[in-house]
Image (spheres, rainbow, N blue to C red):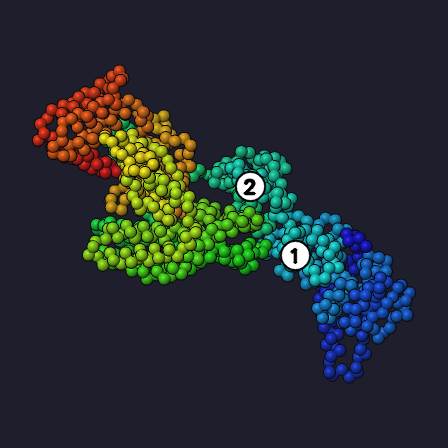
Amino acid sequence: MADNSVLTSTTGRTSLADSSIFDSKVTEISKENVFVGSASYVEEEMPQIETRMILVQEAGKQEDLIKALKEIKVPFVKMESLEEFESLDSPEFENVFIVMDFQDSIFDELHKTDCRIIGPPVILNCAQKGEPLPFSCRPLYCTSMMNLVLCFTGFRKKEELVRLVTLVHHMGGVIRKDFNSKVTHLVANCTQGEKFRIAVSLGTPIMKSEWIYKAWERRNEQDFCASVDDFRNEFKVPPFQDCILSFLGFSDEEKTNMEEMTKMQGGNCLPVGDERCTHLVVEENVVKELPFEPSKKLHVVKQEWFWGSIQMDARAGETMYLYEKANTPELKKSVSLLSLNTPNSNRKRRRLKETLAQLSRETDMSPFPPQTPKSCTKSSKNSTPVPSKQSARWQVAKELYQTESNYVNILATIIQLFQVPLEEEGQRGGPILAPEEIKTIFGSIPDIFDVHMKIKDDLEDLIVNWDESKSIGDIFLKYSKDLVKTYPPFVNFFEMSKETIIKCEKQKPRFHAFLKINQAKPECGRQSLVELLIRPVQRLPSVALLLNDLKKHTAEENPDKSTLEKAIGSLKEVMTHINEDKRKTEAQKQIFDVVYEVDGCPANLLSSHRSLVQRVETISLGEHPCDRGEQVTLFLFNDCLEIARKRHKVIGTFRSPPGHTRPPASLKHIHLMPLSQIKKVLDIRETEDCHNAFALLVRPPTERANVLLSFQMTSEELPKENWLKMLCRHVANTICKADAENLIYSADPESFEVNTKDMDSTLSRASRAIKKTSKKVTRAFSFSKTPKRALRRALMTSQSSVEGRSPSSNDKHVMSRLSSTSSLAGIPSPSLVSLPSFFERRSHTLSRSTTHLI
């Protein structure tokens, strides 16, 4: 008999009816017979009827079948034709026919007379498992679908449905006409209709008709079950079956990825606007208006429908994810709204002061949005009181508490948004990841969260009831043993966790969709799971830096001074337990190169947890961190920013030590700034007078006002947009903030008096030369007996920088200033001694003026 033969019912009873009713009646009759047969009060004993197996034709020649019947101790006889049945029929026996082929003529004749018919696999399975023969009024060839309840939807051809129902019955399955909670599998020929939607909502597996045909082909296999995951998953209805998708608003890379996923999940793709498309998937954050009027048959849905369907392993309902056109475009917050076009310098300064004040107020707010699940966080106490005089120690303590609170929220997001749903039982479509994969990815994150939740509560109590004498070091000493216990297991295996995420994302589409859905939520700040999980790796070094800063601003007589030293030592002890093999030697080599290239670079830049991210060449546009027009190199590390300027030519000859082959340092150290001090990143808009400019709003803990650092990028290899995003991402990582995009503000050049037009002009170069000369003059007169030739040499060096050109009006002005400055050479030495104080007062006045503006 062919495996894919067409089977139809030849009895008068239709196979399309709900077989559950018939099955329940058979069960009741069986129970009733058992009850009557076993009743002790029956006056007249009923005659006992013994079951006898009749091996029909080929079945009588099967040695394994005869051996199995002997093992289960069931009497049997052989029969070659139906004529022999009359001589074998007896009221003492209930005959059960064993037929090898459920399609031949003798099977049809036996089925018409309502005889009990079973196949050889039933006997073999019962003998193997030592179980009694199952009772079935229908022909039962095997038990591969025993205890399965099936429902059908979407089948238009009655002949096909009859064939499928018959095969299910032959394998021991039950059919229900209406879908309810007892249905174990829905066999669907389409992805629409009420039954399909209910099955999706209940998480019932939705199968293709091929599942039944393939199970029938394997009917003779011992111990085969059609409901096992490995076999069943091959024939599940894919989420996008019968769907033709088009994508709008996605990047080329995202679109390619989504098109590949669509084909993997049973769908097809066509360009936007094709009339054959059934769905238009829209990136709602990019697309504000559709390029055409969609037809009524086209489902216009958000991208969450796409990823949600893949995660559920079934086509999600479109009504929950319909794309709606926004009534008004969202206005992104921008400091440019504060700008006014006016040439008046006083109004500019006032506007600049108001703009920075606004940014300062926003900076003081909590850097993490209050969207963490309530189950993982306790309600905060009253708002933190601000001391009348904010000391530097209080500022650092407040920053420590804020970063700790943000870090706890990040851990809560990891647990609630990722770990708990993956561990949840009864997931639609089965578990997304295996338990061992979940354990590898998340490791000891819950234990780390519990420890830092306690630390955060203790810090909150300390900040609310602030006193300079209260000890912060005691808090970290209190939980040092817990930190040693929880951190090394996670940090040591972080690379394995990262590799597991990458591997599972590639191999398991449902996990890929799960990550896409959750990473798009505001709690994640559009960060990936790997980016969130790296926070515990970075947290302890960040705490150590803050405690070091706190120690610097703690008075010697304060008892917390020694306690902080012990706390820092305990954190170093935790970090020494972390596997040294995880260090990246290449990253360390890059740091050493920076140290050798930058003259005066701080030694504490060398750290095992630090790595170089990006180098950017710029020009200073303001008075900070150095004079306007100075060439400045920014070295971005994962937790700090090294600012260095191009080194000026030094008067005199300095010889390298013997054996020193490294070239002299080309840069001069200005400032090593922790990224936590950067409060805002300003993207200066492009205008005719301003190109490639950006600014940083910085708040050192020892200052009461913000400082503005403005730069112009000179390298075109790295786009400004990419650089700013990269910078903000690492700032967010340092302060444990998820929404890094909120750190970037777009601003007009006029708002901050930023201009790059005159950076290469003659006047600009001359002005910079004068400033350099002033500094050299100041240094020259720093001794009481400075010879006059030193001043002349410094002024001649400055004057030579503008020689060789025809003097313009601007040059004449510069030369006049130079000549007036040169007249200082003739002043007697007592007056020269007071000159440095003049420059110092002048510099101090400019500094106060700039601070006032900020």
Q: Is residue 73 above or below residue 658?
A: below
Q: Amino acid at mark 2?
A: Asn
Q: Quadrant of residue 679?
A: top left
Q: Who's the residue at 79% across and 83% down the image?
A: 44
Is 325 or 773 nearer to us in this picture? 773
Left or right relative to 564: residue 301: right
Q: Amino acid at mark 1?
A: His
Label 2 neighbour load within 10 Å: few <14, some 14-19, many 20+: few
The N terminus: image quadrant: bottom right
Q: Position of residue 249 (x, y in %)?
A: 51, 37
- The answer to which of marks 1 and 2 sits earlier in the sequence is 1
Q: Which residue is mark 2?
A: 257
Mark 2: secondary structure? helix
Viewer can see residue 66: yes
Q: Who's the residue at 44% across and 48% down the image?
A: 531
Kindly check if marks 1 and 2 are in contact, taking CB atoms under 8 A apart as contact: no
Q: Who's the residue at 33% across and 52% down the image?
A: 543
Q: Which residue is mark 1?
A: 185
Q: CA distance from mark 1 to mark 2?
A: 31 Å
> For the view shown, which residue lies furthest in the top direction?
806
Q: Nearer the viewer, mark 1 or mark 2?
A: 2
Mark 1: secondary structure? strand
Q: Quadrant of residue 147?
A: bottom right
Q: Who's the residue at 41% across and 52% down the image?
A: 580
The C terminus: image quadrant: top left
Left or right relative to 614: residue 116: right
